[in-house]
Image (cartoon, helix red, strand yellow):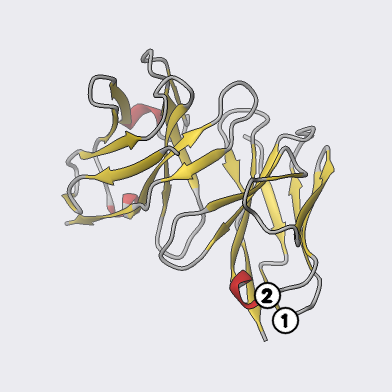
Amino acid sequence: DIQMTQSPSSVSASVGDRVTISCRASQGISSWLAWYQQKPGKAPKLLIYAASSLQSGVPSRFSGSGSGTDFTLTISSLQPEDSATYYCQQANSFPLTFGGGTKVEIK
Amino acid sequence: QVQLHESGPGLVKASETLSLTCTVSGGSFSNYYWSWIRQPPGKGLEWIGYIYYSGNTNYNPSLRSRITISVDTSKNQFSLKLSSVTAADRAVYYCAACGMGRTNWFDPWGPGTLVTVSS
């Protein structure tokens, strides 16, 4: 199985800050990576697919980058509604696996 | 747009079989792999498996011996059975649409249903 490791596990930032979340795959996955946002009590929501493609309807302050084993989700200007847990997921091979999550809190 | 909704018992006795159904509306049933994903309270996400409308399945090896995913195209539904449940199977169970080919990401998701295991 491909292991997905996210860092940090949590981050606290102020409104307007730039926030970066990392995701590392245990082996190369090309660009077969997705990012999700999950708010408490809700299902995850797809933000980014194919490492850097923005899902329709997702604000442009979210962006993704990377390929191979190292990936990044960036929130360019943190908003109050971005308080959530973010997960990466590899789609390169089965079983499909997720990172452990990064909790983003607003200071 | 495609919408999904899970249904089934919220409480299952240990050693028995968990059964959930996902009802799909608003889209073509043949355009996706229909997936189950679970999340223990306060923990991360685990992919369980998926089924195509033809009946072809793909299961997570960690659960393969205990799971069956089936499809009823006449009702636009697919179902999950997880046998011999233990306390470790307590989780929110989500159904989701999974892209085909190499685009195996999940969108959209159902709201999820919490399943608790009683001893």
Three-letter residue code for mark 2: Gln
Task: Report crowding for label 1: few under 14, some 14 to 19, many 20 or more residues within 10 A (C-alpha).
Answer: some
The kind of secondary structure element at disc 2 is loop
The kind of secondary structure element at disc 1 is loop
Quarter that holds the N terminus of chain B: top left
- The answer to which quarter of the image holds residue B71 is top left
User: Which residue is denoted by mark 2 in the rendering?
Assistant: A79
Q: Is residue A14 above or below residue A87?
A: below
The numbered disc on residue A15 is 1
Mark nearer the N terminus (1 vs 2): 1
Determine whether, in the image, residue A3 is placed left or right of residue B84.
right
- The answer to which quarter of the image holds residue A50 is top right
Q: Position of residue A46 (x, y in %)?
A: 58, 48
Q: Position of residue B18 (x, y in %)?
A: 22, 41
Query: Do the residues bearing badges 1 and 2 touch, measured as CB atoms within 8 Å?
Result: yes
Point 40% across, 62% down: residue:
B41
Q: Position of residue A65 (x, y in %)?
A: 82, 48
